Amino acid sequence: MKKAIYLLFLTVLFSACKNEKQTESTVINEVAKEDITTSIYPESITKVFKAHGGIDTWNTMKLLSFTMEKPNGKELTILNLKTRAEVIDTPNYIQGFDGESLWILEKDGKEYKGKPKFYKGLMFYFYAMPFVLGDDGIMYEDIEPLTFDGKSYPGILVSYESGVGESPDDQYKIYYDEATGEMAWLGYTVTFGKDEKSKDFHFIRYNNWQTINGLKLPKSVDWYKYENNLPTEKRNTVEFIDVLLSEEAPDSTMFKMPEGATIVK
């Protein structure tokens, strides 16, 4: 376990140094580079991508790391953006995915009682909006706008081709500011472990951004209560700190299952 944590520390430290050196060049390259990838997306979602720095710039990134403050302590997530290998380090356990196997390492004899298959990639997906909606196998459809506090937000329905991901029946509704193109709301269904699509949409508000390596990413998000598939009032806020984004890929060894861990079947 000490070895795994040590590798995490070295990777984060290395990435921080790389980010300091690359921030300026990344922004310059973004302006000079011809926009090729975005031409394959519909106009509406392309507008959102551009407002957040561009899907082409996002696709050059290979490492993402962020930390969340949880009631029992800090939770650190580190990902390889190309392979989606992942490590989630919490006070009570470490959860990892090496690209093939999902594993859990319990700390200090504390029994893990979560749902690792459900949690794998979950907070990454919410954090990396809107760019994760540029993944392969996604279908887009313009939908009726969302009106909240007297303001109207144009909407896009996002669904998946059959067999894509762990939960291909999941659906997302992304709503954006018509003037700026910035993402404003996310509606999402939860179908993991179910045999059919869900009709209940949960809602997250995105209105607090930070720019890292030329990309506009959440500084915090607000989960909302919902009624009749519409947001009602704020329930809680999740903040993201110590965010690292780099074109340098993390060392693949950090995602390998350490001694004492168990594979999740």
Image: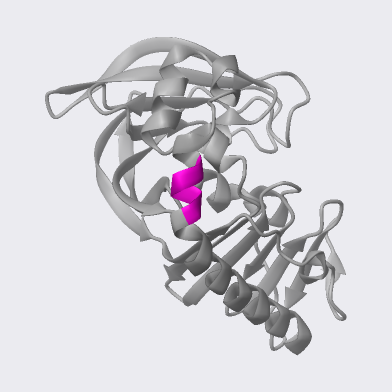
Quadrant assignment for the C terminus:
bottom right
Relative depth, front residue between 202 and 248: 248
Residue 77, given in percent of the width and then of the height, sits at 59, 64
Q: Please report the residue visible at 57 percent of the width from the left and 68 percent of the height from the top.
A: 18
Residue in the image at 58% along x and 78% along y: 13
Quadrant, the N terminus:
bottom right
| Residue nearest the observer in this picture, 202 or 175 | 175
Q: Does the magenta stretch include residue 26?
A: yes
Q: Quadrant of residue 15?
A: bottom right
- The overriding secondary structure of the stretch rendered in magenta is helix
Q: Where is residue 249 in the image (x, y as percent from the top left)?
A: 70, 59
Q: In which quarter of the image is residue 150?
A: top left
Residue 130 appears in view: no
Report whether 130 appears left or right of 170: left
Taking depth in this image into account, of 201 and 89 the one nearest to the observer is 89
Establish if 54 lies above or below 104: above
Q: What stretch is highlighted in magenta?
A: 25-29
- Judging from the image, the colouring scheme is one colour
- Image x and y of residue 164, in percent: 74, 28
